[in-house]
Image (cartoon, rainbow, N blue to C red):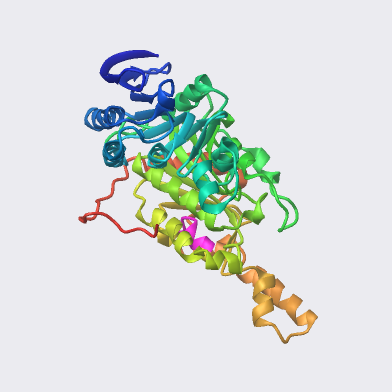
Amino acid sequence: MTAVHLTRKVPGAASAAVRQLAGGRRVVWAEVHDDVHKGALSSAASGVLRNAAQMAHEKRLPLVLVLASSGADLREGVSALHGWGEAARVITECSGVVPTVAIVDGPAVSGPALLIGLCDVVIMTTESFAFVSGPTMVVQMTGVEVSNEELGGTDIHSRQSGVANLVANDMAHAEELLNEVLRYLPDHVDDLPAIIDSGDPANRRCPELNTILPASPTGSYDVRHVIESIVDEGVHLELRAGWANNVVTTLASIGGRAVGIVANQPLALAGTLDIQASQKAARFVAFCDAFNLSIVTLVDTPGFYPGKDLEWRGMIRHGAQLVFAYGRATVPRVCVILRKSYGGAYIVMDSKRMGNDVCIAWPTAELAVMGAGQAAAILQRRATPDERAEFERDYEERLLNPYVAAERGYVDSVITPEETRIEVLAALDMLSSKREKFPKRKHDNGPL
């Protein structure tokens, strides 16, 4: 990695430069070092971050922040707070204009912790930690003693909070992951992702998908196997793999075209959508839409996960985040319904009337308000067991198949599973020239 142009350096505290990564991509690279006062952010150090973000915005280059900071410099007082506040404002201006990546390689406390929360992708090394209020404040306010790792270690942020998109063994590994992320992204919003060279034939069939679904309609399988079958050379980069496991969000290429894939995961909570899954998928859809990545959605979900606790914690609000993300996405969108697609979750997972461009279904797809057993429990409460069984058989024949939806225009085509890669790529090729006019408004007001 070579420095091309030094923007500013504060001795022992922070530095910024335009750099060329090992993969050839140029980025604006800013670092906060923890070798002096544990990386305490002075106003001057924050100024380096601010200037780096301004340069990234002006030069239309990805912004990479490498942080190891104990927070605002106590010796400077309020001016240190204003410093990182200015940096936060300019990083916010970069949002949706250039990709922003934070690499945490040490502490990220208080203000710096919030800075990483502003970035599109967060990579944490295994020895790093991040939190807004540290163990000292926790014990003073709550009386509970907690370590740095228990409060904000890599395991917490990759599995519990969802802050970390990727986890690296060390800084060298973090740079490798950074290159992998940027491989799928353009430099800025006005550009398209580069075509990724692959020896994988565009017309390759996937016969293994014909037998991937279990015989039982309630049986589980790993949707990652479907993803690996249809993407180029089976390679994909999963983001937030340890958090909200009932949905998979991953970057890949299909026929050389970079895509973001959102998939329900039947292995976890039967692929239902809960608060965390909705947040994870919504953030990913918005990320892909911001940087012109086509979105491929693989659907197999019986609906939203029911529960009093979820409703009290705002399932409506958080479920609406996913609706909102798909509803405003303007990139090419291809949906493949693998098996179950019930109720509100059917609408949420990029249904035709949500603005989906091409909706494909396997013959095993079931599109309905709910499953046959659930419908019988509501509509046949007073029926005999034989009457309920007959109702379920009739319900399945009349409603739980993709051909009814295709007749009504909700599904564009029903395909065999082995044709999935070919059909998805054909749809992406057809949609490559898709452009939408943006509404004239200051900004939207999404359900945060």
Q: Which residues are magenta?
A: 345-351
Q: Position of residue 127 (x, y in %)?
A: 56, 28
- Tell me, yes or no, if residue 20 can be seen here: yes
User: Image check: 84 left or right of 242?
Assistant: left
- Residue positioned 68% across, 74% down in the render: 394
User: Image check: 388 left or right of 33?
Assistant: right
> Which residue is nearer to you in this view: 152 or 97?
152
> Which residue is nearer to you in this view: 140 or 66?
140
Q: Position of residue 212 (x, y in %)?
A: 69, 45
Q: Quadrant of the N terminus?
A: top left
- Residue positioned 74% across, 85% down in the render: 383
- Image height of 105 relative to 394, above or below: above
- Residue positioned 34% across, 43% down in the render: 290
> Which residue is nearer to you in this view: 63 or 294?
63
- Image height of 331 relative to 12, above or below: below
Q: Position of residue 11 (x, y in %)?
A: 32, 17
Location of residue 270 (image quadrant):
bottom right
- Image height of 315 relative to 69, above or below: below
- Residue positioned 46% across, 55% down in the render: 350
Q: Is 374 a magenta residue?
A: no
User: Image check: 289 left or right of 204?
Assistant: left
- Image height of 369 relative to 186, above or below: below
